[in-house]
């Protein structure tokens, strides 16, 4: 690990000032914010991230870790711990897909350390990104190429990819958030603003710039709107081993049903895409139809129709389809 300066932020304004001065906002920024540190410290030890300054934002916990459930929906501070949100009784009862996405992530020790804000910003587990001995990685060195295109890419993405990068977004929570139409509250030098969670992560065109965060901007909270689909929601994760493993395919599903007929479906896909993925065309294909294995399979084919494979990951479209069908049929049986 390389030497770095350490600062402590007393509030969002001071954190933003530290970040703005050094260009916080892209993956190679010389200033990085430190919360749980469960990804950041690993990448510093691997010499992938080389920040000149860390800004500790843990003093902001008291004001930005609340969990509030009301008639308009759910609001969670970005510094809330994953374990606290996963165990919250009202989240478990009213937003089960969110709770499940957190329960199935990482290990108990990491869930006790990691924050929601850091979780949605975690970096890919692509071997070519995490090992600096590979020189061709557009996330680390813009313009150097993507070694995964012709390399070992079994766990890489098949949706939202291009020739610049096929890295897989590794998170679970983000898949549930995008399915439920969440919003992100941000704080920075220009003041507070709110954006759809779907607009937080950038497409693959410039892999070294992963988010739309402005310089010095922090995530301060997440909002999940109330809706008739939140109780009938679940997160299904398929992985190579039963625990402490990243998804090779996952689906977050939320349904509003009128008997057997789908009033509205919300579907997020994980383990398959460059960034958290909303399957909007598949949702539209289910609206107004009975939810059967046949209609679920048709929706899954629609969701994966744009998949692009690169050899080792050619199994993923079929696995993604089966995962989505299984999730839809399981959600159908839930009590609303």
Image (cartoon, rainbow, N blue to C red):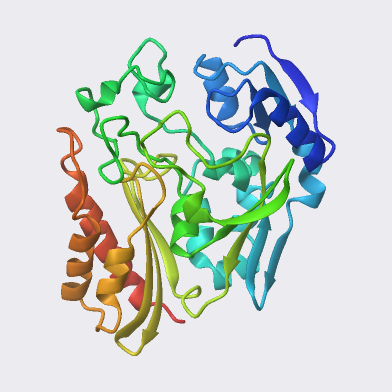
> At x 54% / y 68%, what residue is drawn?
95
Q: Where is residue 314 in the image (x, y as percent from the top left)?
A: 16, 40
Quadrant where the image shows the N terminus: top right
The answer to which of 125 and 51 lies nearer the viewer is 51
User: Which quarter of the figure has residue 295?
Assistant: bottom left
The answer to which of 168 and 209 lies nearer the viewer is 209
> At x 52% / y 60%, what residue is drawn?
98
Seen in the picture, residue 78 relative to 13 is either above or below; the reply is: below
Q: Position of residue 262 (x, y in %)?
A: 32, 82
Q: Where is residue 127 in the image (x, y as percent from the top left)?
A: 36, 23
Would you say residue 101 is visible in this rendering?
A: no
Residue 309 as seen in the image, left or right of residue 102? left
Q: Where is residue 213 in the image (x, y as percent from the top left)?
A: 58, 41
Would you say residue 40 is visible in this rendering?
A: yes
Residue 18 as seen in the image, left or right of residue 186? right
Q: Residue furthest right?
A: 10
User: Which quarter of the figure has residue 233?
Assistant: bottom left
Q: Which residue lies furthest to the bottom in this view?
A: 259
């Amino acid at each position: 690990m390389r030497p770095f300066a350490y600062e402590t932020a007393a509030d969002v304004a001071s954190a933003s000032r530290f970040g703005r001065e050094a260009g916080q906002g892209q993956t190679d920024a010389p200033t990085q914010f430190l919360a749980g540190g469960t990804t950041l410290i690993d990448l510093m030890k691997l010499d992938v991230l080389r920040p000149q300054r860390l800004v500790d934002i843990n003093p902001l916990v008291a004001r930005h870790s609340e969990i509030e459930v009301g008639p308009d929906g759910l609001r969670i501070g970005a510094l809330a711990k994953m374990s606290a949100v996963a165990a919250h009784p009202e989240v478990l009862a009213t937003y089960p897909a969110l709770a499940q996405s957190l329960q199935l992530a990482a290990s108990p020790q990491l869930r006790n350390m990691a924050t929601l804000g850091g979780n949605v910003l975690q970096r890919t587990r692509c071997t070519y990104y995490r090992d600096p001995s590979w020189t061709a990685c557009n996330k680390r060195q813009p313009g150097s190429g993507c070694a995964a295109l012709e390399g070992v890419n079994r766990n890489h993405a098949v949706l939202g990819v291009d020739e610049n990068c096929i890295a897989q977004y590794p998170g679970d929570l983000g898949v549930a958030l995008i399915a439920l139409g969440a919003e992100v509250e941000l704080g920075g030098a220009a003041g507070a603003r709110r954006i759809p969670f779907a607009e937080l992560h950038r497409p693959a065109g410039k892999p070294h710039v992963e988010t739309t965060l402005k310089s010095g901007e922090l995530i301060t909270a997440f909002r999940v709107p109330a809706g008739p689909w939140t109780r009938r929601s679940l997160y299904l994760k398929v992985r190579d081993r039963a625990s402490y493993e990243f998804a090779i395919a996952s689906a977050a599903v939320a349904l509003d049903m009128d008997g057997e007929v789908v009033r509205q479906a919300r579907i997020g896909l994980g383990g398959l895409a460059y960034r958290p993925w909303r399957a909007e065309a598949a949702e539209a294909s289910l609206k107004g139809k009975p939810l059967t294995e046949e209609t679920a399979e048709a929706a899954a084919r629609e969701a994966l129709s744009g998949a692009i494979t690169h050899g080792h990951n050619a199994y993923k479209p079929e696995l993604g389809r089966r995962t989505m069908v299984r999730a839809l049929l399981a959600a159908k049986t839930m009590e609303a």
